[in-house]
Image (cartoon, rainbow, N blue to C red):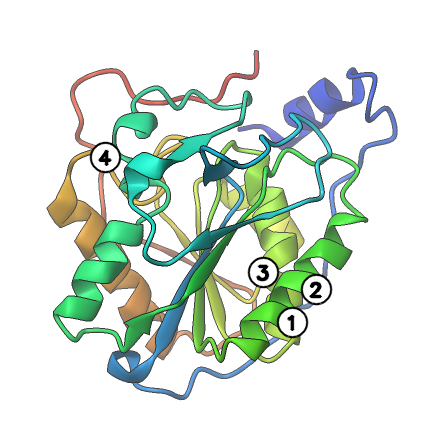
Amino acid sequence: MNLATLENYIKLMDFAPDFHYAVNQESPWTPFTKEIKECNVVLVTTCGIHLKGDQPFELVNDYSYREIPGDTSLDQLMITHEFYEHTETDQDLNAIFPLDRLRELAAYKEIGRVNETHFSFMGFIPQWEPLLESAREVASKLKNQRVDLVILTPGSPFCNHSTGLIQREIEVSGIPTISLTVEREITAQVKPPRALYVGFPAGCPVGEPFDREKQLKVLREVFSEIKVIQKPGTIRRTPFKWTRSCSAPQCKLP
């Protein structure tokens, strides 16, 4: 997505006439030193997912977050987000919030365990400065829960901006992070510590819905790359291709 086009679109909205991207020159950095098979892993997302009984997110500039227990069944969850098409993602939330896949990898003993709580934001936040405080609250909770690795996933194209900002605050707290991005240019401006560019459509950063094997491969790629990325601000291109023949989820901006 063209950065200037998205910026102009957001500025036309009543709630963000003064919108500007966060542009950072440096990235925070916490070295990753543990073995993956010993790690307590957590998901943090900006896709707007939450328990069906929770209060839904506001659609713009909602700085709150929702906590999702690690033993939650995905049929107990729903997405509140109007800035990407998630009709197909709703059918398999692992495509954006791969909790089932993490639990499988824990059962295979490829990771240590799945954290007791995961965190979700609604990432369409043009007036983004207050988001940093919420990100610090989540970072503090993750520290208390002794999390070793945070995987972040975006929802809409603009959610990649919020994802990077949240990621930076968690990394500052001393926890290694890595994100999946579907908008490399936005992520490059925010400059989170580590990111993998997947080249998938908005709504499916972990792969096609119901493609369990690809979703597992994407997560295994995350675990492989976290061990070898040594330069702060690195964005690596993954080898995966989008192969679904039916309609793909797309950003709902004009």
| Quarter occupied by residue 63 | top right
Distance from the alpha carbon under mark 4 to that under mark 3: 24 Å
Q: Residue 128 versus residue 94: which sits nearer the camera?
A: 94
Q: Residue 237 versus residue 107: which sits nearer the camera?
A: 107
Tell which circle, 4 or 3, labels the residue nearer the N-terminal end. 3
- Where does the image place residue 175, in percent across and percent down from the top left? 54, 76
Relative to residue 98, is residue 142 drawn left or right? Answer: right
Q: Which residue corresponds to mark 3?
A: 167
Q: Which residue corresponds to mark 4?
A: 208
Callouts 4 and 3 close, C-beta under 8 Å: no
The residue type indicated by label 3 comes to: Gln
Task: Estimate how packed mark 4 is, as few (under 14), some (14 to 19) or many (20 or more) residues with alpha carbons within 10 Å.
Answer: many
Tell which circle, 3 or 2, labels the residue nearer the N-terminal end. 2
Circle 4: element type: loop
Circle 3: element type: helix
Callouts 1 and 2 close, C-beta under 8 Å: yes
Q: Which residue corresponds to mark 2?
A: 136
The C terminus lies in quadrant: top right
- Where does the image place residue 146, in percent across and percent down from the top left? 49, 80
Tell which circle, 1 or 4, labels the residue nearer the N-terminal end. 1
Callouts 1 and 4 close, C-beta under 8 Å: no
In the rendered image, is residue 28 in sight? no
The residue type indicated by label 4 comes to: Glu
Distance from the alpha carbon under mark 1 to that under mark 2: 6 Å
- Where does the image place residue 99, in percent across and percent down from the top left? 31, 52
Please tell me which residue is depicted at 45% across the width and 33% down the height of the picture. Answer: 52
The residue type indicated by label 1 comes to: Ser
Q: Which residue corresponds to mark 1?
A: 140
Please tell me which residue is depicted at 35% across the width and 23% down the height of the picture. Answer: 249
Q: Is residue 223 above or below residue 130?
A: below
- Where does the image place residue 137, in percent across and percent down from the top left? 69, 63
Callouts 4 and 2 close, C-beta under 8 Å: no
